[in-house]
Amino acid sequence: MSESPKPTNELTSTIHINSLRNVPDSSAAERAKKAYMALNQETRGLLAQLAANTAMFVVQSGASAGSRYLVDADATSIGRDKQSDIFFDDATVSRKHAVVKRSGNSFSIVDEGSLNGTYVNALSVSEHELTTGDVVHVGKYKLTFFQSQPDLETSESETSGEK
């Protein structure tokens, strides 16, 4: 009986599938319109009243799904610390998870060295400029970012046949 030769180079890899996220396949404009259309009338009304240099997060999943958070300061903290401006009481969120920084009419999110990371549109970020429709993952919470954008309301009425 002859022995079969043993391979000389072996490679073993481990993939943790539960950490993979779906990567969005739409453009920023499509994502913004889709996110806006998914909102209820009350939230749309609140968005229509936002000043140009303010924004809002709407929680899509997690224990506080449906909650809305106004972003109207130059720095808005997100974390598990009770002093956070946006407080999430969950072990998947670091005490000082991230900060949303405002500069004029633009906003960016900065990860504060969180253990689980901060994700925007399924991509891990250390800092990222936010646009309407961006989906931000903080721990197990999924938040959608919105700025006041009347063009979304216009495009909605055009697609529904209203003039």
Image: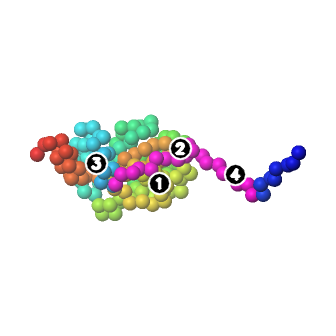
Marks 4 and 3, how far apart at CA: 44 Å
Mark seen at residue 123: 1
- Residue, far front: 1
| Disc nearer the start of the sequence (2/3) | 3
Give the amino acid at mark 1.
Leu
Marks 3 and 1, how far apart at CA: 20 Å
Q: What element does badge 2 sit on?
A: loop
The region drawn magenta spans 9-27
Viewer-nearest of discs 1 and 2 = 1
Q: Residue at x 33, y 50 (%)?
A: 31
Colour setting: rainbow
Q: What element does badge 4 sit on?
A: loop
Judge whether residue 58 can be spotted in this image. yes
- Quickly name the residue at label 2: 92
Marks 1 and 4, how far apart at CA: 26 Å
- Majority secondary structure of the magenta segment? loop
Horizontal and vertical percent for residue 53? 28, 57
- Quickly name the residue at label 3: 33
Judge whether residue 72 can be spotted in this image. no
Viewer-nearest of discs 2 and 3 = 3
Tell me if label 1 and label 4 are in contact, CB under 8 Å.
no
| Disc nearer the start of the sequence (2/4) | 4
Location of residue 137 with respect to 63 vertically, above or below: below
| Disc nearer the start of the sequence (1/4) | 4
Q: What element does badge 3 sit on?
A: helix
Q: Residue at x 47, y 54 (%)?
A: 123
| The N terminus lies in quadrant | top right
